[in-house]
Image (cartoon, rainbow, N blue to C red):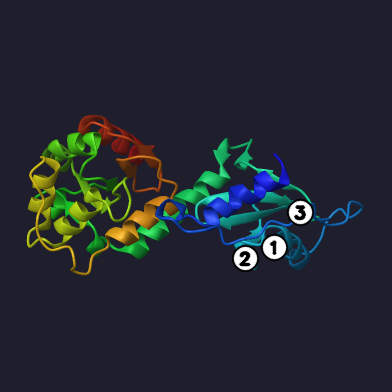
């Protein structure tokens, strides 16, 4: 991987709203001299100096000691990279503990997703859960698009999910982006008096009319989906922060969640 590739990789996360049309907030440095080849290590300030001089879209606070000795971690949103202790070499990829077989990087991503969803808040989601709160066993957050075929398929089975103790929290991700019909529909659903009914009707293909000017979280959720690396809808985020891309039948999802709990 070339230096320019590395810059582009990290800059794409720094500008995670690129799908919404923002411009890269960095200026690549041509053929920089980084670190000292004779040096085996450097303190964190030196590493931060070296990295931020080259990857100018990365902030100093994005760089921390990694879980593995001799490496520093760069985190920008849900994107990670690693730098050698002399601040010279950039490593792209996940950090895996070969003893436990655990991806330490993916665990960080899971924690990041949980924290970002908590910051968004359930009040900014449309929630379908079991009739009795005591029957709720698992909560799954679903980034959804009103016009997505598999999103509609999932919602047609919403009663099956809730009957199995799964609460579904919907966040909007209109794949076509802002200023499009799907985006308008999402806003109109949120502005409806009965959001759950409006979402259900919209996913059945009923024309979505009504106000779109009320305060709504659609843009915030769309941008959050981009920052979390969403590639398509529906995207499910499980209670532990793991991502499942695509539709999963209620029975299979319940089995997966219950098995994880027992494990």
Q: Earlier in the sequence, mark 3 or mark 2?
A: 3
Residue 138, percent from left and from top = 26, 46
Residue ID at (36%, 38%): 244
Nearest to the observer: residue 66 or residue 148: 148
Q: How far apart are marks 3 and 2 (CA)?
A: 19 Å
Which quadrant holds the N terminus? top right
**Foreground: disc 1 or disc 3:** 3
Residue located beneath label 1 in the image: 52
Q: How many labels does the image show?
A: 3
**Foreground: disc 3 or disc 2:** 3
Residue located beneath label 2 in the image: 59
Callouts 1 and 2 close, C-beta under 8 Å:
yes
Callouts 3 and 2 close, C-beta under 8 Å:
no
SS at mark 1 in the image: helix
Query: In the rendering, which numbered label is found on residue 164?
Result: none
Residue located beneath label 3 in the image: 30
On the rendered structure, is 51 left or right of 61?
Answer: right
């Amino acid at each position: 991987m070339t230096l320019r590739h590395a810059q582009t990789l990290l800059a794409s996360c720094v500008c995670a709203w690129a799908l919404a049309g923002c411009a890269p907030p960095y200026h690549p440095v041509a053929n920089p001299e980084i670190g000292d080849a004779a040096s085996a290590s450097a303190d964190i300030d030196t590493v931060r100096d070296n990295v931020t001089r080259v990857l100018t879209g990365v902030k100093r606070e994005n760089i921390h000691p990694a879980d593995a000795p001799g490496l520093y971690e760069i985190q920008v949103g849900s994107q990670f990279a690693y730098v050698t202790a002399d601040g010279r070499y950039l490593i792209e990829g996940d950090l895996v503990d070969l003893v436990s077989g655990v991806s330490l990087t993916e665990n960080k991503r899971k924690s990041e997703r949980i924290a970002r969803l908590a910051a968004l808040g359930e009040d900014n989601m449309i929630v379908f859960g079991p009739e009795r709160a005591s029957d709720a066993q698992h909560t799954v957050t679903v980034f959804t698009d009103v016009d997505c075929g598999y999103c509609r398929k999932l919602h047609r089975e919403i009663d099956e999910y809730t009957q199995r103790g799964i609460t579904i929290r919907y966040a909007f991700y209109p794949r076509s982006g802002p200023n499009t019909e799907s985006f308008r529909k999402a806003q109109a659903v949120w502005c409806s008096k009965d959001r759950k009914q409006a979402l259900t009707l919209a996913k059945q293909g009923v024309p979505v009319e009504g106000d779109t000017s009320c305060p709504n979280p659609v843009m915030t959720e769309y941008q959050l989906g981009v920052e979390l690396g969403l590639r398509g809808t529906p995207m499910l985020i499980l209670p532990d922060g793991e991502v499942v891309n695509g539709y999963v039948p209620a029975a299979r999802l319940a089995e997966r969640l219950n098995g994880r709990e027992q494990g």
